[in-house]
């Protein structure tokens, strides 16, 4: 699942002032902008907002005047962009893409940060190398028409000098990364080289007709040809480099030349840096070249090329010397091996699953749990930006784009944004078909038309780099099967008994066919009635014994299964409850519940399938030996029936599993829809939406029925094929066996006994075949459980934390900053600094989304500050036991959750034991009175023993809130946190609670979050937050006198 990208907000234009952006203020300072210049730029500039992958400019082509013009799309979203514009990055990042010369592949040339510029290069320099610009995330770009900029430059020449220098540096980097042999260096070496190379480059102009030997005779520099043409013996071409000693006497400039030069000493120093860095890294084995990337238009190449090379087909291209190529997957026979598929574990995992599939395509396997963490997967999935960042950390070069399908057909496998809330991996195109790997539905070929109807136009192109093969994180495997075997080991005595009973059952299973043979061949022939009675009694006794042994074995299996279920599930829940709150906030409740069921699947495999199937298979060998003893030819005929049955099972199992998952998914959707409809039946009836809701449910029911029908058709087909194999086999065995009997090579008794043993041979073989599929399912279950077990608990037993004594309640925020995700444009809390003394009542107010609830989440230790320190009584919250802190906090959250049970149990939270933490009825009544809950509880027939229903549905919102307040007061907390604690109370109840608040907060520190400012007027201090920043603080009168943000909020609520 994926957060909606918001295609309808592709470009948003506004006349926002440039100086409102802090980075642009720095830009103005760098150019020494006067107020007049700032005013003119503000007037001329239009701010445009782009999303990740949006194309800002396309490649430039030269017109008759030798000027470059941006290629504009006819798309209405870009109609407002003039053909020549100057761009200034105000927020976010922009990526410049250019064409790498040797293989004509598009690469990421420059990533522009805030304050950088691009566009209109030709106004400042000649022979511009073309590029196109795309948004590397959500960004705001200032746009000024080139004609307007020219007028401003005439008036402010200092700005022109600054812009010319910026564009020259930008073009140098594009030149070295696309035209020279330095492009063959790995990305990490390039990043190391540029700071030691680009600042020291000097430009030199050589007029046409001048000899290079004469021009450079006194130079000891290293040279690169930036543009122009040289004639002579083996002359250098565009991008070539040479030392002064390499210059031939007949090298003459045919056209004006632009030469980049660098002192030989600086060049050697830069190369030495690269060599030392390379020697410290592992060597990379050269691999066959990858598929070519999409090629920009022919007219997008540099004009400095006097003889532009034609693009060659991919198969004929050869990598330049020294270029590290990357592996192309080996051609394998099976499609599933050539194009891997990984099933997503939950709806939010589709993006991480696509990364796993594409990395496996390139020969590297990554743990899905590691990728989920790397991409910061939340409940609503991952953004394209977070997937791009994760892929870059894995070792891919990424390009998020918004494009048509045509230029993407020849790309390496890429990720497509699907149906607005999903991701799929696109492997290849063939004629008018697309091979798509959907993490939820599997691999399938689909038509181009069907694909484009579901594709949003956003794509993440992934090209492997050498770093992908240096990434050893892929070797992470998490928990393994052997870790679960250790759980079974304490029950080895019961397992030994089960094995012994299984062995006896198999041995007793031989008795019936053997007795049958003796009766038919000897007793019947001799017509001995007494002997027949003896054998009948023997068969009866053996049957009774076998039944008793089977019942005993089943009892032991059930006992073992239940004990291991308790061990696995209780261990799982215990570990899950020890995890931090962010683990649960990033996952759906259903995902965690599903993982509980995975424990049962593992238990069933370890205690049932694995034990019985292998033992049955070993006994099958004994049966086969006995059948060979009877007649080896007939035994071979039986064995010949096994391969077709095994092949049918192996071929059918993946399809059955796929349909089973599809049925499960559709059934879950239908059930969820039905539960929602029934749970919200009051809303449905209030809005007269019964028919529409029923239609919605019927659509999902139809999908489920269709999935079941497909499964039934497949099962029926398999049954027909299996029945045919069985009929043919039975007929062949009967015919051949009868032939052997007629020819006196087999007795009637042996033939009947032989037929009785056939089932004991084929069934175990099929069980072993099925065991392999069950094992694969268990591996998937273990990977899902690893998502929980690999998460680190809040408090590690191997790193003891400081256990807080009874605290006083002093709280200090020292320059605290925090954000929930690195993808967020700004911090949720920014540089908060304040100190609260013990016993002080502090109110926190501000608009919605200002960070009020986040502040108290940090106080509870749910999250740690990314920057700064938060201390409780002088102890840094990072170093204290959170359990010892939380027992001294009383918290009333915004959403008051009640558990199924009585009112008393919800106030005490089942703390009714004999330990020090237990609570009595008297204590519950005392805190209920403070919370103004005692009166309504007493009015109920059962008083404190009244059941509250599921999630407290039998109580009103105000009643639930008062019970939550009583719960928070139980245990005499030293710090009290009330997060909108009175939002559901009526005016009278709130007034009485306010009267009690002074008594409640006496001798304890209190934090009160409220939108209703009447609640906080009497607080000792009021903190006013605005977009995560502490805007104001003081008491009510002081803040009203300042007439700031608090005054503005108060005006809207209070009668002032």
Image (cartoon, rainbow, N blue to C red):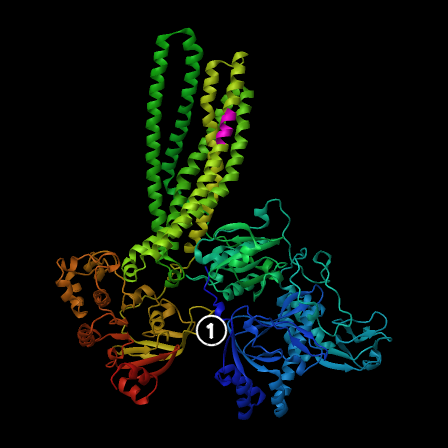
Q: Which image quarter: residue 284?
A: bottom right
Q: Which residues are magenta?
A: 722-729
Give the main secondary structure of the magenta stretch.
Answer: helix
Q: Quadrant of the C terminus?
A: bottom left
- In the image, residue 945 above or below residue 78: above
- In the image, residue 199 above or below residue 331: below
Q: Residue at x 85, y 73 (%)?
A: 232
- Could you say where residue 812 lies in the image, as x and y percent from the top left? 34, 77
- Could you say where residue 917 lies in the image, as x and y percent from the top left? 23, 61
Residue matched to label 1: 825
- In the image, residue 914 above or below residue 1000: above
Q: Which image quarter: residue 931?
A: bottom left
The local crowd at label 1, few if under 14, some if 14 to 19, many if 20 or more residues have their Cα within 10 Å, is few
Number of numbered callouts drawn: 1
Q: Which image quarter: residue 846?
A: bottom left
Q: Nearest the camera: 871 or 1048?
A: 1048
Q: Residue at x 27, y 84 (%)?
A: 1036
Q: Is residue 124 visible?
A: yes
Q: Is residue 167 magenta?
A: no
Q: Quadrant of the N terminus?
A: bottom left
- Could you say where residue 744 lies in the image, as x and y percent from the top left? 53, 11
Q: Is residue 464 visible?
A: no
- Could you say where residue 532 lies in the image, as x and y percent from the top left? 37, 11
Q: Nearest the camera: 490 or 641?
A: 641
Toward the right, the furthest residue is 250
Left or right of 5: which side holds 309? right
Left or right of 529: which side holds 43? right
At mark 1, the secondary structure is loop
- In the image, residue 448 above or below residue 625: below
Q: Residue at x 58, y 62 (%)?
A: 461
């Amino acid at each position: 699942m994926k957060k909606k990208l918001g295609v309808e907000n592709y470009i948003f234009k506004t006349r926002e002032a440039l100086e409102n952006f802090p980075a642009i203020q720095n830009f103005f300072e760098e150019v020494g902008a006067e107020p007049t210049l700032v005013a003119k730029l503000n007037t001329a500039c239009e701010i445009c907002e782009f999303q990740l992958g949006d194309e800002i400019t396309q490649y430039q082509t030269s017109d008759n005047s030798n000027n470059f013009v941006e290629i504009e799309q006819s798309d209405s979203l870009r109609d407002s962009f003039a053909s020549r514009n100057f761009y200034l990055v105000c927020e976010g990042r922009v990526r410049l893409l250019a064409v790498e010369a040797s293989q004509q592949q598009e690469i990421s040339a420059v990533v522009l940060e805030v304050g950088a510029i691009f566009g209109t290069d030709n106004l400042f320099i000649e022979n511009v190398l073309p590029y196109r610009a795309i948004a590397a995330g959500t960004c705001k770009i200032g746009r000024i028409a080139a004609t307007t900029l020219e007028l401003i430059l005439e008036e402010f020449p200092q700005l022109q000098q600054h812009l010319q220098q910026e564009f020259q540096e930008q073009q140098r980097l594009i030149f070295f990364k696309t035209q020279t042999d330095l492009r063959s260096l790995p990305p990490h070496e390039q990043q190391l080289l540029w700071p030691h190379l680009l600042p020291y480059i000097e430009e030199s102009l050589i007029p046409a007709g001048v000899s290079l030997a004469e021009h450079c005779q006194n130079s000891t520099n290293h040279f690169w040809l930036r543009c122009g043409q040289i004639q002579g013996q083996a002359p250098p071409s565009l991008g070539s480099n040479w030392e002064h000693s390499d210059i031939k006497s007949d090298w003459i400039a045919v056209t004006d030349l632009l030469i980049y030069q660098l002192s030989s000493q600086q060049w050697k120093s830069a190369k030495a840096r690269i060599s030392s860095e390379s020697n410290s890294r592992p060597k990379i084995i050269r691999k066959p070249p990858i598929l070519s990337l999409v090629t920009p238009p022919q007219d997008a190449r540099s004009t400095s090329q006097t003889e532009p090379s034609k693009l060659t087909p991919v198969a004929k291209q050869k990598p330049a010397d020294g270029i590290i190529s990357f592996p192309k997957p080996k051609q394998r026979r099976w499609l599933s091996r050539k194009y891997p598929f990984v099933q997503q574990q939950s709806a939010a995992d589709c993006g991480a699953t696509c990364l796993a599939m594409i990395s496996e395509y390139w020969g590297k396997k990554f743990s899905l749990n590691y990728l989920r963490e790397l991409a910061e997967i939340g409940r609503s999935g991952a953004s394209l930006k977070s997937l791009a960042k994760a892929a870059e950390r894995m070792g891919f070069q990424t390009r998020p784009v918004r494009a048509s399908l045509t230029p993407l057909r020849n790309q390496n496998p890429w990720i497509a944004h699907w149906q607005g809330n999903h991701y799929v991996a696109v492997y290849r195109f063939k004629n008018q078909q697309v091979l798509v790997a959907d993490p939820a539905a599997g691999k399938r070929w689909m038509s181009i038309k069907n694909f484009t109807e579901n594709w949003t136009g956003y794509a993440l192109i992934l090209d492997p780099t050498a770093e992908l093969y240096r990434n050893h994180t892929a070797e992470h495997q998490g928990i393994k099967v052997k870790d679960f075997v250790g759980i079974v080991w304490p029950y080895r005595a019961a397992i030994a008994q089960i094995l012994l009973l299984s062995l006896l059952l198999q041995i007793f299973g031989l008795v019936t066919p053997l007795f049958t043979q003796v009766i038919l061949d000897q007793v019947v022939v001799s017509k001995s009635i007494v002997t027949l009675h003896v054998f009948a009694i023997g068969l009866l006794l053996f049957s009774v014994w076998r039944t008793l042994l089977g019942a005993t074995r089943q009892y032991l299996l059930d006992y073992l299964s239940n004990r291991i279920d308790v061990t696995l599930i209780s261990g799982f829940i215990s570990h899950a409850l020890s995890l931090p709150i962010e683990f649960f906030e990033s996952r759906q409740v259903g995902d965690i519940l599903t993982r509980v069921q995975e424990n049962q699947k593992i238990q069933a495999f370890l205690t049932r399938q694995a034990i019985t199937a292998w033992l049955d298979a070993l006994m099958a060998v004994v049966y086969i030996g006995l059948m060979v003893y009877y007649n080896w030819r007939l035994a071979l005929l039986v064995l010949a029936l096994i391969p077709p049955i095994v092949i049918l099972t192996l071929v059918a199992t993946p399809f059955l599993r796929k349909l089973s998952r599809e049925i499960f998914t559709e059934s879950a959707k239908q059930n969820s829809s039905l539960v929602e409809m029934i749970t919200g039946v009051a809303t449905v009836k209030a809005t007269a939406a019964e028919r529409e809701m029923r239609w919605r449910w019927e659509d999902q029911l139809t999908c489920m029925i269709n999935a079941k029908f497909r499964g039934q058709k497949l099962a029926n087909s398999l049954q027909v094929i299996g029945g045919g194999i069985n009929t043919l086999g039975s007929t062949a065995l009967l015919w051949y066996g009868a032939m052997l009997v007629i020819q006196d090579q087999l007795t009637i008794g042996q033939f009947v006994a032989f037929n009785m043993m056939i089932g004991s041979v084929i069934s175990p073989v099929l069980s072993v075949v099925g065991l392999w599929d069950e094992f694969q399912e268990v591996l998937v279950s273990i990977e899902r459980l690893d998502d929980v077990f690999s998460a680190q608990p809040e408090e590690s037993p191997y790193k003891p934390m400081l256990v807080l004594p009874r605290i006083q309640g002093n709280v200090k925020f020292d320059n605290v900053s925090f954000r929930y995700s690195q993808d967020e444009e700004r911090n949720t809390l920014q540089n908060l600094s304040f100190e609260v003394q013990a016993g002080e009542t502090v109110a926190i107010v501000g608009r919605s989304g200002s960070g009020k609830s986040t502040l108290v989440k940090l106080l509870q230790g749910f999250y740690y500050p990314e920057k700064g320190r938060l201390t409780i009584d002088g102890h840094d919250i990072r170093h204290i036991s959170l359990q010892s802190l939380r027992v001294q906090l009383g918290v009333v959250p915004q959403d008051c959750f009640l558990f199924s049970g009585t009112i008393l149990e919800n106030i005490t939270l089942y703390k009714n034991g004999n330990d020090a933490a237990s609570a009595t009825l008297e204590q519950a009544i005392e805190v209920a009175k403070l919370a103004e809950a005692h009166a309504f509880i007493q009015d109920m027939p059962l008083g404190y023993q009244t059941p509250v229903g599921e999630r407290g549905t039998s109580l009103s919102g105000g009643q639930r809130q008062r019970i939550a307040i009583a719960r928070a007061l139980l245990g005499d907390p030293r710090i009290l946190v009330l997060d909108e604690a009175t939002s559901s109370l009526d005016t009278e109840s709130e007034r009485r609670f306010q009267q009690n608040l002074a008594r409640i907060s006496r001798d304890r520190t209190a934090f009160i979050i409220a939108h209703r400012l009447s609640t906080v007027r009497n607080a000792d201090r009021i903190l006013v937050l605005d977009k995560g920043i502490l805007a104001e603080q003081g008491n009510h009168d002081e803040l009203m006198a300042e007439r700031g943000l608090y005054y503005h909020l108060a005006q809207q609520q209070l009668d002032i």
